[in-house]
Image: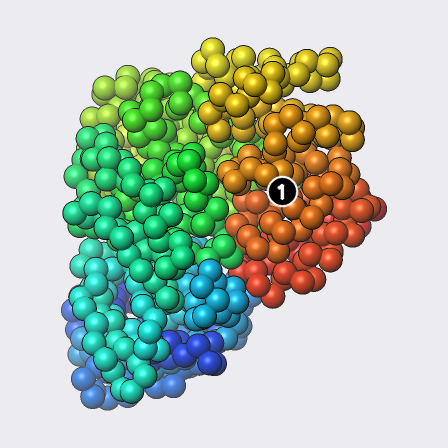
């Protein structure tokens, strides 16, 4: 019988873990986590149990509570999956304990030296388990369909604080120089939502159920930037139903974090590039919050159904935005997303199978398939369904969908069966088969228009004929408006045009990274060397893949840019997360064809 997840050794015919009990120690000196993971089964089990591992050293396995040893063997290394850990459980095993240690090169962990942090005094550790990297942190059934609750004890050096995607249950001194933090996650989660961070951290309460954590030098700025989060939670509840995770806390990580945000339940991880100083990038928080319903509550069963997480969440994010800021703000966000989608479709022009919504990824690393397609194409499919069903009826459907599949991980086929049950014929009416199973974007995909979007697009289209914005007027634009305008400008300009843009709009000095990177990509692709040092600084300090990929790509358009990119990468690569490093290497591998 084939495995249900092409990216996991999980076998649904074998015993399934109901929960984990973890006792872990974080060793910054050796850059490893070691300890014991106990997998608790729903009922007593015996026989073969296959688990996912990657880079783990397995010391011992035995029935929990001092029971009989569980013989084990590690299979050969498979580039994507890692090594299968096959246990043979003694008869009537209710739980199995595995003593192990991670590798210093674990892809799911990034170890930061003190100089890579804001405070420069203490080291820092954070995890990133999506899509299939929990197996590099603990032996587990690393498939989204195999949900678990967990408890954990995490021992760290004294003076540092541990946080997790779980509720804190207190902390106490351990042996001299160490402190143990305890956590409990009562709701069942997929393994990719397991999260841990350790560093010099402080927290600030934003409401009775929301707190932001960050390094001491950053925490006040973060608390101010995200002060409106409780209002977002209340708005989301009015749209999608009760918030089922008790708390919504956030952690602002050092700048090497490879994503804008990661929706770990109870502890969303965020990039510090969101701290623009004017709350212009807090929509990312709305996105990660929306995942509390679309992704965390109802989850894609495997990476092949990723659009169920991200397409629904982009739709939900923009519903929140429309409710809080009005329909024009939402339409502008759809406009920004349209450009992101066009770029993603172009990137996979030679791999159109990765632009389907319902993908088939056997033999494909899900990190290599990652793009804006499931986000933006998926969101447009949801809108097509919403418009065909009617907004009020679709809202009722969404709440019924959440209720039916609450704390479950499902497939596209299960989703389609359910929507057909509620709205017979709806899928056919919107051409769902084309959306799900054909590359690119359907010709009748929903469009989002508003007067302001049309004005900005027309202004940008007039650039080549000499039309320029009034710098005084630009000062009154919202950040999203400036971003939309920059997105629609020519990708390559003359030196004179670049100088006009920067001199009149002050782009190189912008604190909003969306605007800054959009500008740097235009300037770098144009060979405009006055921005090269700003590009060097950004690529040397920021590891967010959304920025790293296009900026290395833009630098690759000219010989001086390629030279700079190679210099920066040689120095910065050791500080990048493994995912970011791979993205940069992939982009730079294409330089030879551009030389």
- Residue at left offset 37%, top offset 66%: 200
For label 1, the SS is: helix
Q: Nearer the viewer, residue 292 or 123?
A: 123
The residue under the point 29% across, 87% down is 176
Say left or right for 91 vs 264.
left
Residue at left 21%, top 63%?
Answer: 168
- Which residue is more in the foreground, 64 or 85? 64
Judged left or right of residue 42, residue 115 is: right
Q: Residues within 10 Å of mark 1 (few under 14, many from 20)?
A: some
Determine if residue 86 is in view.
Answer: no
Residue 370 locus on image (x, y percent): 51, 46
Q: Which residue is mark 1?
A: 550
Image quadrant in which you'd find residue 312? top left
Residue 75 x %, y %: 47, 76
Tell me the quarter of the picture where residue 174 sits: bottom left
Q: Does 283 sit left or right of 527 as displayed?
A: left
As displayed, is residue 566 above or below residue 315?
below
- What x and y, as percent, mark residue 504? 64, 25
Position of 387 relative to 494 (above/below): above
Q: Residue at x 46, y 60 (%)?
A: 118
Which quadrant, please, contains the N terminus?
A: bottom left
Left or right of 149, for residue 578: right
> Considering only vertical position in the picture, is 335 above or below 221?
above
Residue 126 visible in this rendered orientation of the protein:
yes
């Amino acid at each position: 019988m084939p495995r249900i997840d092409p990216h996991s050794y999980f076998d649904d015919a074998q015993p399934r873990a109901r929960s984990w009990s973890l006792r872990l120690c974080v060793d910054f000196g050796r850059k490893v986590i070691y300890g014991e993971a106990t997998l608790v089964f729903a009922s007593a089990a015996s026989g073969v149990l296959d688990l996912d591992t990657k880079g783990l050293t397995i010391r011992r396995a035995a029935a929990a509570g001092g029971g009989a040893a569980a013989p084990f063997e590690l299979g050969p290394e498979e580039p994507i999956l890692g090594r299968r850990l096959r246990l043979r459980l003694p008869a009537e095993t209710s739980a199995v304990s595995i003593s192990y240690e991670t590798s210093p090169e674990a892809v799911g962990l990034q170890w930061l030296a003190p100089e890579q942090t804001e405070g420069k005094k203490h080291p820092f550790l954070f995890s990133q388990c999506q899509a299939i990297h929990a197996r590099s942190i603990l032996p587990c059934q690393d498939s989204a369909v195999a949900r678990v609750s967990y408890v954990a004890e995490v021992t760290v050096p004294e003076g540092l604080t541990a946080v997790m995607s779980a509720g804190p249950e207190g902390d106490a001194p351990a042996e001299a120089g160490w402190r143990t933090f305890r956590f409990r996650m009562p709701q069942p989660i997929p393994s990719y939502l397991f999260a841990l961070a350790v560093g010099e951290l402080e927290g600030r309460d934003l409401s009775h159920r929301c707190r932001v954590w960050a390094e001491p030098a950053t925490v006040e700025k973060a608390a101010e930037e995200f002060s409106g989060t409780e209002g977002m939670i209340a708005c989301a509840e009015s749209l999608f139903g009760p918030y089922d995770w008790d708390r919504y806390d956030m952690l602002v990580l050092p700048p090497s974090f490879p994503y804008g945000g990661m929706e770990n339940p109870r502890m969303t991880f965020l990039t510090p590039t969101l701290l623009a100083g004017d709350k212009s990038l807090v929509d990312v928080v709305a996105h990660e919050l929306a995942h509390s319903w679309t992704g965390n509550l109802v989850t894609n069963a495997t990476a092949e159904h990723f659009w169920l997480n991200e397409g629904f969440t982009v739709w939900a994010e923009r519903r929140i935005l429309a409710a809080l800021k009005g329909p024009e703000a939402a339409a502008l966000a759809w406009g920004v997303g349209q450009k992101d989608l066009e770029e993603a479709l172009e990137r996979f022009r030679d791999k159109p199978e990765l632009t389907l919504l319902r993908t088939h990824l056997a033999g494909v690393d899900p990190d290599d398939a990652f793009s804006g397609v499931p986000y933006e194409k998926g969101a447009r499919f949801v809108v097509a369904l919403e418009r065909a069903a009617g907004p009020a009826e679709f809202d009722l459907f969404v709440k019924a969908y959440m209720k039916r599949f609450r704390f479950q991980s499902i497939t596209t086929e299960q989703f389609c069966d359910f929507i057909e049950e509620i709205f017979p014929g709806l899928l056919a009416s919107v051409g769902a088969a084309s959306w799900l199973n054909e590359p690119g974007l359907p010709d009748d995909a929903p469009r989002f228009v508003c007067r302001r979007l049309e004005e900005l697009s027309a202004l940008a289209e007039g650039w080549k004929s000499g039309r320029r914005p009034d710098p005084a007027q630009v000062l009154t634009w919202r950040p999203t408006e400036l971003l939309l305008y920059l997105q629609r400008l020519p990708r390559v300009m003359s030196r004179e045009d670049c100088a006009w843009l920067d001199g009149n709009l002050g782009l190189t000095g912008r604190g909003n990274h969306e605007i800054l990177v959009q500008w740097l990509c235009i300037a770098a692709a144009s060979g405009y060397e006055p921005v090269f040092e700003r590009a060097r600084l950004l690529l040397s300090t920021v590891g967010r893949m959304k920025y790293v990929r296009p900026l290395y790509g833009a630098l690759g358009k000219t010989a001086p840019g390629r030279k700079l990119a190679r210099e920066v990468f040689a120095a910065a690569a050791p500080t990048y997360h493994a995912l970011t490093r791979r993205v940069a290497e992939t982009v730079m591998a294409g330089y030879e064809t551009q030389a």
